[in-house]
Amino acid sequence: MIIQICVGSSCHIKGSADIVELLQKAVQDYRLEGDVTLAGSFCTGQCNRVGVTIQVDDDIYPGITREGFQEFFHDKILRKLRGERV
């Protein structure tokens, strides 16, 4: 699975560095180093007023915040890795 975090100027201002840290920690905590590749990307054109845009494989999720990160991670990343419908 490839997870790309937007680090363009808009997402940077909205906290992309915090989201990168949260993703890095979650990948380590769940021991997903062999299953997940984290990468930065520039604008995907899916900017939202709040939060950061993340692309998981071909799916784009705008508006990810620190407060909503855990729900996003469980619903869109862990479930997909486990082969559950997302």
Image (tube, rainbow, N blue to C red):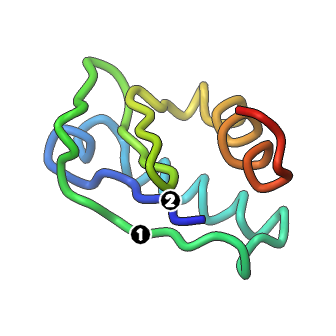
Using residue 53 as the reference point, say whether residue 75 is left or right of it.
right
Position of the N terminus, as image quadrant, is bottom right
Residue 86 image-quadrant placement? top right
Residue 39: x %, y % from top left: 41, 69
Report the residue at 36% width, 39% height from top.
53
Query: Residue 3, which numbered label?
Result: 2
Query: Residue 10, which numbered label?
Result: none
Residue contact at pointers 2 and 1, CB within 8 angstroms:
yes
Residue 80: x %, y % from top left: 73, 47
Residue 66: x %, y % from top left: 55, 34
Of pointers 2 and 1, the one earlier in the residue sequence: 2
Amino acid type at circle 2 is Ile
Report the residue at 19% width, 56% height from top.
42
- In this rendering, is residue 25 above or below 6? below
Using residue 80 as the reference point, say whether residue 69 is left or right of it.
left
Report the residue at 72% width, 57% height from top.
26
Amino acid type at circle 1 is Ala
**Residue sitting nearer the eye, 48 or 56:** 56
Determine the secondary structure under disc 1.
strand
